[in-house]
Amino acid sequence: MQAPSLYSYFPSKAAIYDAMFSEGARAFLERLRTLDMPPDPKRRLLASALAFAEFCVEDPVRYQLLFQRTIPAFEPSAESYAIAVATLDLGRDVLASAGITDAASLDLWTALLTGIVDQQLANDPGGQRWTRLLADAVDMFLAHHRRGRR
């Protein structure tokens, strides 16, 4: 599609990015909502971590748009961002099922997962060098939480 034709559908480049953000966030939310979650909290954490990693590595550009803020000055609209917040709420629910409810643990969890995905995409695209470590990461996260956060 030529740029003039594209702009007959979208008023600006930011609107195009917003539509892409909304579509990506909606796809991730749908993926999480349809995930078959095991009853065991540890397995729930692993299932959600695997779903996140798979979603991210299957489309690195979408991952960058949704989770890395790589487009200077782009801010998703309130409507698009609300979809992303709904996915984060599902993540909070998964952590809560394991008895983890504090904001700092959610921050650690998201940093852990995005760090693994970043390593995977940067250093072994198409492979599993880092994503295969997700089970160990879940075990470490839970052990850290059981010991009590510092």
Image (cartoon, rainbow, N blue to C red):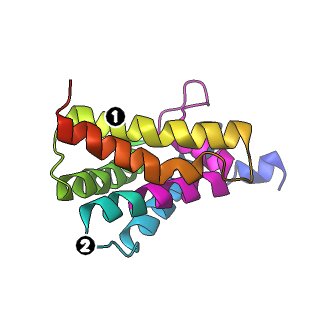
Is 118 on the left or on the right of 134, as rendered? right
Q: Identify the image quadrant of the C terminus.
A: top left
Compared to 137, does 68 lie above or below?
Answer: above
Disc 1 element: helix
Percent of width and height locating residue 97 = 19, 59
Image quadrant in which you'd find residue 11: top right
- Kindly check if marks 2 and 1 are in contact, taking CB atoms under 8 A apart as contact: no
Q: Which residue is mark 2?
A: 39
Disc 2 element: loop
Compared to 103, does 51 lie above or below?
Answer: below
What amino acid is labelled 2 in the image? Pro
Q: Residue at x 19, y 42 (%)?
A: 146
Q: Which residue is mark 1?
A: 108
Q: Do we see residue 10 in this rendering?
A: no
* In magenta stretch: residue 22: no
Compared to 23, does 120 lie above or below?
Answer: above
Percent of width and height locating residue 32 = 40, 65
Quick one: label 2, few (<14), some, or many (20+) residues within 10 Å?
few
Q: Identify the image quadrant of the N terminus.
A: bottom right
What amino acid is labelled 1 in the image? Leu
* In magenta stretch: residue 55: yes
Q: Residue at x 72, y 53 (%)?
A: 127
Quick one: label 1, few (<14), some, or many (20+) residues within 10 Å?
few
Q: Do we see residue 89 in this rendering?
A: yes
Q: Earlier in the sequence, mark 2 or mark 1?
A: 2
Image quadrant in which you'd find residue 40: bottom left
Q: Which residues are magenta?
A: 48-76
Q: Residue at x 49, y 59 (%)?
A: 50
Between 107 and 148, which is closer to the camera in this rendering?
148
- Report the predominant secondary structure element of the magenta stretch: helix
